[in-house]
Image: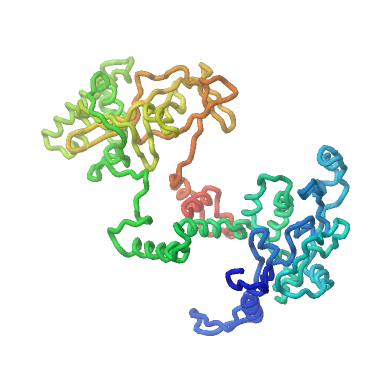
Amino acid sequence: MCLLIPCPKSPGKDFDTFMRPLIDELKNLWVGVATYDATSGGMFNFKAVVLWTTSDFPAYAYLSGYSTKGHLACPECLANTHFRSIRSKTCYMGSRKWLPSNHQWRKSKDFDSFVEYAEPTKPKSGDEIVHLLDQLPSVTPGKAPNTSGTKRKLHELHPLHNWSPHSIFFELEYWSKLKLQHNMDVMHVEKNIFPPSFFTIMVHLCIHLPDQALLGGPIACRWMYSAERCLGTYKGYVRNAALLEGSIAEAYVVDEELTFLSLYVKGLETKFTRPERNIDVICNESSSFALFKARLRCSGTSHLKFLTTEFDALQWYILNNCHEDIKSYLDEHMDILKQNFSNNLEQLQARTFPTWFKSKMEELRHKGSSEATDDMYSLVLGPFDRYTSCTSCIINGVRFHSKCRDDTLHTQNCGISVPSNHGGEEVDFYGVLLEVMELSYILDRKVVVFRCKWYNTDKRMRNIHCETDLTTIKMSSEWYANDPYILATQAKQVFYLADTKRDKQWMFVQKISHRNIRDIPIVDAIDEVLATPYCESSTSSSSLITPKLYMFWSYLIA
């Protein structure tokens, strides 16, 4: 305001001066303004009202006309504000009177050495506030004179002490009838709950938030989070406020220009079209196998290494996890084994299937069969002996680091979790990533495998404790040392946190939901919609919305 009228007689806190054009327009909108309707091609009487105002607490005083400073700073309790002066500080107590009359805390003297018998303060209606304001004397607009040295005593406080003349909003015909005139912004109240000083007026205001929620409805329609975040973005654009180019207005224009270029100019990289940091790519788009089309990207330090004794284990694990593509061949090979053997069939298949499958596919390819595709032929020949060892991999927007790289960082990205079968039971395996192995096949096919270290979480060994929302594991012993490999696409990231109640070998397992990655139950929701009749004579339309369908729609909207 001082920028608008920089003079000794400037209005000061008389914010109504700047609200005059808005109030005049709101008066006209209450009566109605003739407006053209493009749909019907006619005119209609357009009306609008103000539901409430939303602002921070200092601006609350400018809009309402009630001072939010001093001993009677609560705009809901008004003259019944319970305060106590401690040296140079004012504390706002008396919050126990909002408790039920038979609550045990009312009789306790541990709070302020008194028993609380008072009833909750009832907020005044708009008509009662108008009656109070009519008792105020006329005040000349502008800054108050210098009254230093004339501080009032506590016994001189009047119920109208904090009120200034009529707020300009009371000129609106309907304003005194509104139950919620000035909304307390939840964002600013929450932000100031724990300032350096406690028991301030901001802590007391939390008592009135539930009542305003009943009157105003959903809080997301009344808080200032969106507005403050937008202003914070624009303020962050400013580099040198002393120059014109550093103003918020110039930054806003630049933001609009970048938005236009990103929408209508192809091939131009802006901050809106720039790919994310954890971006992944499809390994081979021409392949029909999901194994070769995984979305991932290896990064970090890389070295060339050679496969030795682990070749057979890797080959069988990869083949066994292509069950959908080679199921018929696995069943055929198992039938052959059943004719010749009766015991240890799974171990025999793991040892003999790669060789049998290779000879089978070479025979089909020699005959020119359509079953021997390039993907199938690359798969049966197995990976090359030389592979690329990396320390980092990005899969579906999630970054994984090897344990050796994680030890040099302050962050943690090496935790691995995989659901699998153990003893006929589905369990979660927990471990850490040791190495990212990028295996190369013929015809430019690649597969990324994780070599992991699994912690022994066998329930019989009592190495895992599962509570309601917490899982604790013991990291002292290793599990499945001869089966350390998983496909990169099977890994789920977890974090390990120290369990302070036990020794250092115990860790909490924290599962998280990554940003922009959701498990959407599309199949269940669609099946439920198809199974639901379109019309039901005895039920309402709301009965068609099932919990799963509601969850599905919520995911799509988000």
Q: Position of residue 52 (x, y in %)?
A: 66, 66
Q: Position of residue 528 (x, y in %)?
A: 49, 49
Q: Position of residue 82 (x, y in %)?
A: 82, 52
197, 392: nearer the viewer: 197
Q: Is residue 396 left or right of residue 545?
A: left
26, 59: nearer the viewer: 59
Q: Is residue 328 visible?
A: no
Q: Residue at x 64, y 62 (%)?
A: 54
Q: Residue at x 44, y 63 (%)?
A: 243
Q: Is residue 553 left or right of residue 88?
A: left
Q: Is residue 273 left or right of residue 49?
A: left
Q: Position of residue 206 (x, y in %)?
A: 71, 51
- In the picture, which quadrant includes the N terminus? bottom right
476, 19: nearer the viewer: 19
393, 170: nearer the viewer: 170
Q: Is residue 29 visible?
A: yes
Q: Residue at x 53, y 26 (%)?
A: 498
Q: Residue at x 35, y 29 (%)?
A: 486
